[in-house]
Every structure is written in structure tokens, then in C-alpha cells.
Amino acid sequence: MIENIILSMRGIWSHKLRSILTMLGVIIGIASIIAIVSIVQGTNRKLEKSLIGSGNNVVSVSVLQENWEYDFSGGIPSGIPVVNDASIENIKNIEGVVDACKYHTRQGWNQVFYKDVGLSYGKVVGINPGYLNLVEYQINSGRDFAEEEYTNGKKVAIVDESAKDMLFNGENPVGEALEINGEPFIVVGVAKNLNKQQEEYESINDYYMNSYSSGQGQIFIPDGTWPIVYQYDEPEAVAIKVENVKQMQSVAASASDELNIYITNMDGYKYGANSGDDTESLKTLTNAIQLMLVGIASLSLLVGGIGVMNIMLVSVTERTSEIGLKKALGAKRRVIMAQFLTESAVLTSVGGILGIIVGIGLAKLISTLTGLEFAVSIPWIFISVAFSMGIGILFGAMPASKASKLNPIEALRRD
Amino acid sequence: MILELSNIYKTYQQDALEVPVLKDVSLSVDKGDYLAIQGPSGSGKSTLMNIIGCLDLPTSGNYMLNGTNVLTQSDNALSEIRCREIGFVFQSYQLLPGETALHNVMLPLSFAGVPRHKRRAIAEEALKRVGLGERMHFMPNQLSGGQKQRVAIARALVNDPNIILADEPTGALDQKSGAQVMELFKKLNEEGVTIVMITHDSGIAAHAKTIKYIVDGRIYDREEDARHAIVEEEQSAEATEAEEA
């Protein structure tokens, strides 16, 4: 076997041009598949990062109305209670959950002002102890809320870096007064998103996605103060940190089930992960595109396979006397079969490996030109090599069988 | 008895015409024999060689090779028989041009299933036996015709076959190289190797212990009978021509 492989390699090397031309179909096919898969996988990974987790493995479940996040500024529908602590404990016990924390949030135009500057599409978040840590924000100037501030209705606020930039023009906001929904708040600290990576804005799409998910600035206030600014008994959303991005969907579903037990409303309000579903549908779409493109690329592999079959037939004809001699000297059919099958399998495998290299290069090129992210998929590399080897065996079978059946007398008589 | 052909007929089908090539050929070879089969071209000696070599099967008759009935064997079984029982020496050497002498000699060992690590030593031994110990790593195109034929003989010997079957072994060689090959055959035969050689050349055939003559598909033990057969054949051909005229 090893002997056959070495012989095949030597054969390929001694007919360099012919081998390359033969392999071209396989190279193009595998290269397109690898490039497509790399780009699609990269895009999926990006979607996963920017839409669900922003890189901090946190999924949020909130009250949805027909799959859209319900805006409680329109009033609290009947039959939706606030989240009880037992539910939070239950959610924390779900497999794969690291931590869970309830919070309120409101996003909208000009609900926050500093002097006459409004936060155009900012988010106000009513937080409980541990929330900032869970979503991976860190106080980098000023201070965190004190324990008692969470419950005693004190009007204090922490702003994030985007809010600091927009409202205070980057100046230190600690000690300044903000107006939230008409109520005055004192800024006590600035929090930085530890996962926010400026350099990730490689395209306008990234910017849009990032802006959508984190909002144009966030203002954190103690959850105990929330009813003063908005309303009493407003049902909370729950932020859940999971061990692994892949668990987000299932954890969000289990957590929603837990919270939905208490909903008695009949109008279709229920807890769910809003953005997570978007990601899933987008991923379904990109996967469908991937499937289609891989299908098209496979046609090129088919054509490549036929090319290999053709050249193997030529090779059998060229080497008739060699085959005849080997048979005369006692080679059985399977020895001849194995020789030619190995040769075509090695030929297409080498083509496949070259295709992978070209494909990764192509993905990198596309990535640089368009700003799309790419991710090299290890399983697909193995699939590609196995697949191209399979093509060699499949399309080499007929020529190899033809060779093995050559009559040694006819074959030896040729020269 | 190593080899016994009895009442072998071989007929080729050429369109609607049946062309008899071998007619009632019976032949036996004992261990240690050195047999030459001499005949002019077109006498059917190549066909006979193919049949003895298990490369072709007769139309009818019986062929026992070392206790095996060759006629009932499958294609793969025939390969197996050729591998173990017969060492071929061809007129045009039939060496693989891209392989060294040593690798050419190792080839039949791989078909016989000899473990890889043992092949080299056996092949080297065979090459030494034919006097090419010094040129094992030469490519065929770096060897003279006589040397190539000796590599081919080493290859024929390597599986320790029951007979060496040589088809015009000196046909492509000059006088001197041819004589060397004949000397080698003589030496091998003295060492106990059974040799069947097919040739048109009476000078070459004379090196064998026994000579048989083949004319027009029939085997004769004595040269006179063969000559007679040739004359008869010519006469009958003339007669037919005359008749036709």
C-alpha cells in the first residue's frame, strides 16, 4: 500500500503538468467549497457573537408579544406578574447556566438628558446586584452602587462609555446630574463593556449590528428606583449567563418555560429570547445559502472526477505492457486494481489538499475585500480530503478494473 | 513429472475461419530437464510457449503442471501458478524502465506475498547468482542487452520456480552476450533448475539437453521428421495451388 502511494506520488511528479491539469477540476471544486464554508461559518460566528452574546455568553429572556420584545411603556398587560426569586433560583439550576439576574430595561428616544443634550436612542436599565458583573461591565471611574442603594430608592446612575461620549462629550460625568424621564439622577460611576472591541467594526454591517445590540449608550439605575421613574410591578427581563454560546438557545427556552408558568394572560404574551431567534433564523438562511453553493461547487467536483477518469484511462492504455508484464509475472487482478485505484485516489487527494489551501486563500481574499469574517472549519477540511479521495476511488474504479482485466498476451505483444 | 501436456489443440477464430495453430501436441518435462523447442516463425511456438506459461489456455487437451490441472483454473489462480511455478524470460527482456535492476527483480516477490523486509535480500541473492551483484542499483537503460537479460533471468529465478520458460532469450542479443546467457542457463541447469527454451535458432537450441521440433503446429522428436514435414507441407501447398489454377 505504502509502496503504491510512493509510486503514485512519483508518477504524479513525473507528469507534473498533466497531473495539475487533471487535478484542476478537483482543486477548483474543493477550493470553492472551502471558501464558501469558511465565509459562511465566519458570518455565522459573527452573528452569534454580535446578536446573542456580544461575546459575553449572556442571553436575555423578556416578555414577547408575537415574538417581538414587548415595550412596557405601553402599560402592563394583565396576568403577567413580576419575576419571583424562586424562578431565578430555578433558572440558575438549569444545566449550563453560570448565573442569572433580573433587570428592567427601556429603550427609546430622549428619555435621558444632560442639560439640553438628549441620548437619542439610549437604553435605561434597572439593575440588581451582580448584573454589571454578569454582563461583563466594569466600573472604570467613580464607584459602583452601594448595597443599600439598590433598595432605598436613591436616584443614582452609572453610565456606560457610549453614554459618556454622547451626553458628556467624553468629559468625566461623575457627580453630574442627569434627567431620566423627568427625574434627576446623580452619576456615580462609569462602566466599561469588557467585551466591546472597537476594531471589530470591519464593515458598516458590523457597526449597525453592534449599535442595535448594545444601543446608543446605556444608563444603569438601581432596580429599586425603577418604579419612581417608570411604573410599579413592571415584569422584569432576565439576563442569563451560560457556559457555552451553543447552550444559549436551549437555556433560553428552559428559562422561558420556567417564567411562563406564572403568566395567566391569554393574549399571547410569553417569555422568550428575542434576539436569539433572529440569530437562529439568520443562521438557517446562511446555512441554506451554504448548502446551495456547496451543491454548485460539487458539480465542479463531478467534472473533476470525470477528468480523472479520463486521464486514468489514458494511463492504463499507456502502461498496457507494464500491466501485461506484471500479470504475466503473477500479479493478481486486485494487485493491478489497487495500483490504479491508489494512483487516482492519491491524485485527487493531492488535488483536494491543494484545493483546501487555495480555498482558504480565497476566503481570506474575500474577507479582506468585503469585510466579511471567515472561519476555517476543521471538520470541513477532513470532509474535503475524504471526499476528494472518494472521487478518486469512484472515478478510478472503471479504469482500474479495465487494467486488471487486460490479457497479458495481448499486453506483452504490443512492443 | 513437472509438466505434462497431452493432446493439446489450439484453434484461433479469425472471423468465420478457424485457424488451427497447435495440433495434437504432447510434451512432458521432468525435473532438471533442459528442453529446447525449435521451430520456424509461424510454427505455433509462441502459442505453445503461452500455453506452457499459463498465459493462454488450449482449446482442447490436458495440461498438468506440478500436479495441478491448469485448464480448470480461474484467472486469479493462473496468476498464482505463474507466480510460483514459472519464471519467464522474454526476448525483449520486459524490464520496467523506471525501476532499478534490484527493484525489477523484487517485483515478483511482492506478487508472491513475500514480506517486504525479506524481498531485498532474496533479490540481491538472485542478482549475484547471475553475476550482476555489482550493478543492482543500475537503471535498465544503464545496462547492456546481455546484462538486461541477466536481470530478467534473476527476476525469473527469484520466486524459486519449478521451470524457467525462456522465449527466444538471445533473440535481441549479439553473439557474445547470447553466448553468456547460454552459459548462464547451462550453469543454472547444472544447479538443478528446469529450463524450457523456445527458439528458431538451431545454434541456440543445441545448448539444451533435449531438442524438440515444432512445424506447422505439430511437435517432432527428430529433426528429420520435422524436415520431412516441411517438405510435405510445401508440396501440399503447391498441389493446392496447382489444383486451384
Image (spheres, coloured by chain):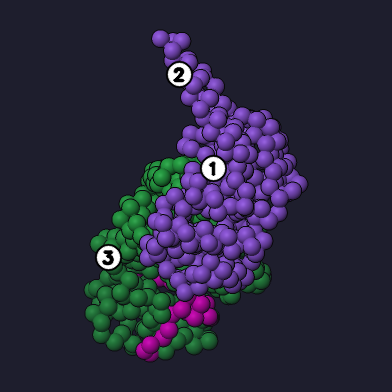
Chain colours: A green, B purple
Q: Nearer the viewer, residue A99 or A38?
A: A38
**Measured from the top left, where is residue B239 in percent x and y?**
48, 16
Which mark lies nearer to you, 1 or 2? 2
- Nearer the observer, A306 or B84: B84
Residue B201 position (above or below residue B117): above
Which residue is the site of mark 2? B238
Q: Residues within 10 Å of mark 3 (few under 14, many from 20)?
A: few
Q: Report the chain holding disc 3.
A: A
Q: Residue at x 46, y 85 (%)?
A: A145
Disc 1 to disc 3, how far (Cα)? 79 Å
Which residue is drawn at the image coordinates 66% and 49% (left, top)?
A: B81
Mark before the other along the chain sequence, 1 or 2: 1
Residue A121: x %, y % from top left: 32, 65
- Residue density around tag 1, few if under 14, some if 14–19, many if 20 or more, within 10 Å: many
Q: Which mark is residue B38?
A: 1
Subunit bearing disc 1 = B
Query: What distance separates the C-alpha of mark 1 from that of mark 2?
Result: 25 Å
* x 53%, y 53%: residue: B89
Where's the N terminus of chain A, which quadrant? bottom right
Q: Is residue A94 above or below residue A11?
A: below
Q: Position of residue A334 (x, y in %)?
A: 59, 49
Write the start and end of the magenta stretch as one range: A121-142
Give me the residue at 53% from left, 86% from top. Answer: A148
Going by the numbered disc 3, the residue's amino acid type is Thr
